[in-house]
Image (cartoon, helix red, strand yellow):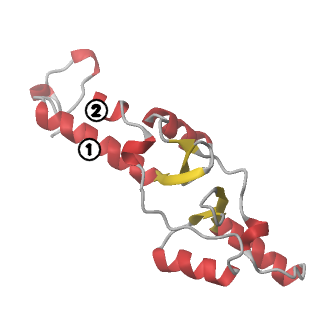
Amino acid sequence: MDSYRNQTARDIMIKKVITLRPHVHAMDAIKIMLKHKIAGVPVVDTLGQYVGVFTEKSSLSLLIGVEYESNPTTEISHYVDTEAATIDEETDLLTIVNIFLKKPYRRLPVLRNGIELVGLVCRRDVLRAFHRGVKQQTTTSDSGILFLSGLMEREDSTVLP
């Protein structure tokens, strides 16, 4: 199982990331999220530097603001979560798992030098990496199931591989 433990964000991240600019109209941002079936989109400035994330939750806040508080703007810039957690390319897989377990995030932007967006890691990417690592181990080893301290032989197990 070491094959997945040694992986970093660079190994599992999505590199072709859909992004938005801060001046994008809310309805355009929502349309993009619906079209691509994504719950959040990193926002970058004109230099490609990371600003934050615009999410479904951000969209709901914006819609409430426009409807009830008569906010004059429908640009997403005021609703971008600039405090959302990010990781760098060298963040290891288990650290990423811990972030996902402790925080309500579904995705983590991957930054280079703290400002340049280079990718995105989603919960599903972590699961895919884990599955590949375990699958790779089971195809190269005799045992497909890990038994506690070898207390039971594979043949004696009630769990079928």
The amino acid pointed to by label 2 is Ser
Badge 2 marks a residue whose secondary structure is: helix
Q: Position of residue 56 (x, y in %)?
A: 63, 69
Going by the numbered disc 1, the residue's amino acid type is Arg
Q: Given contact means CB atoms under 8 Å apart, are the residues at marks 2 and 1 in contact?
A: yes
**Residue drawn 21% across the image and 41% down it:** 135
Left or right? Give the position of 48 relative to 136.
right
Residue pictured at 12% horizontal, 29% vertical: 141
Position of residue 121 measured from the top left corner of the image (x, y, whole percent)? 47, 51
**Which one is earlier in the sequence, the residue at label 2 or at label 1?**
2
Task: Tell me the number on the disc at residue 92.
Answer: none
Badge 1 is on which residue? Answer: 132
Q: Hey, which quadrant is residue 138 in on the image?
A: top left
Foreground pick, 26 / 44 = 44
- The residue under label 2 is 3
Q: Label 1 crowding class (10 Å Cα cut-off): few <14, some 14-19, many 20+?
A: some
**Residue 108 visible here:** no
- Residue reaching furthest to the front: 47
Label 2: how many Cα within 10 Å (few below 14, some 14–19, many 20+):
few
Cα–Cα span, label 2 and label 1:
9 Å
**Between residues 150 and 67, which one lies in front from this camera angle?**
67
Say what secondary structure mark 1 lies in: helix
